[in-house]
Image (spheres, rainbow, N blue to C red):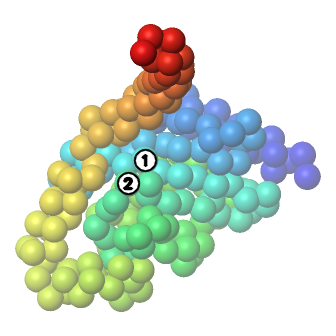
Amino acid sequence: MSSPSKRREMDLMKLMMSDYKVEMINDGMQEFFVDFNGPKESPYQGGVWRIRVELPDAYPYKSPSIGFVNKIYHPNVDEMSGSVCLDVINQTWSPMFDLVNVFEVFLPQLLLYPNPSDPLNGEAAALMMRDRTAYEQRVKEFCEKYAKPEDIGAAQEEKSSDEELSEDEYASSDDEAVAGKADP
């Protein structure tokens, strides 16, 4: 069993040393976020998505679970949960692949070559087959609305500063309440 765990550590370190921003979800090495840029010369260009990656115990013999945290308009990505069609991952996965391959090959290929015949988002698949131009426009609208580069960083900074503010507000509201009772 130590072989898969060593491989997991090695693949994760390789991903962290690449150009991808990786953020661990907890102390383990099985769940983490990776910031992913849409492929150039595609309707997804300019978009940045936070990808949640979960590595199964049997990794690399079993494929990672991959999901988009922020919304993306794509036939093979569930619009509500962000999960990527597992059939697509499992059909192409091999222990020869590593996590860098997921972000340099698999996800760009998924975005560049959607498969509308095996959809998780039926509306996106139908629009793509019916009117490719309208589909690409909708993709760009989603990129503009949900996947701006500043949104990824801002969401994180907002979250941490909100926590700090709420602690400060909590402390100052106690002081005001006590001061209010002492000075009628």
Say if 138 sits above or below 162 in the image.
below
Q: Residues within 10 Å of mark 1 (few under 14, many from 20)?
A: many
Can the viewer see residue 42?
Answer: no
Front one among 129 and 145: 145
Q: Residues within 10 Å of mark 2 (few under 14, many from 20)?
A: many
Q: Are marks 2 and 1 in contact (CB under 8 Å)?
A: yes
- Measuring from the top left, give residue 160's x and y in whole percent: 47, 28
- The residue beneath circle 1 is 50
Residue at x 90% of width, y 46% of height: 2
Say if 11 sits above or below 90 in the image.
above
- Measuring from the top left, give residue 141's x and y in whole percent: 15, 60
In the rendered image, which quarter contains the C terminus? top left
Can the viewer see residue 152?
Answer: yes
Say if 73 sits above or below 147 in the image.
below
Is residue 78 shown left or right of residue 125?
right
View extreme (front): residue: 184
Sequence-first disc among 2 and 1: 1
Front one among 184 and 48: 184
Q: Which mark is residue 70?
A: 2
Q: Secondary structure at mark 2?
A: loop
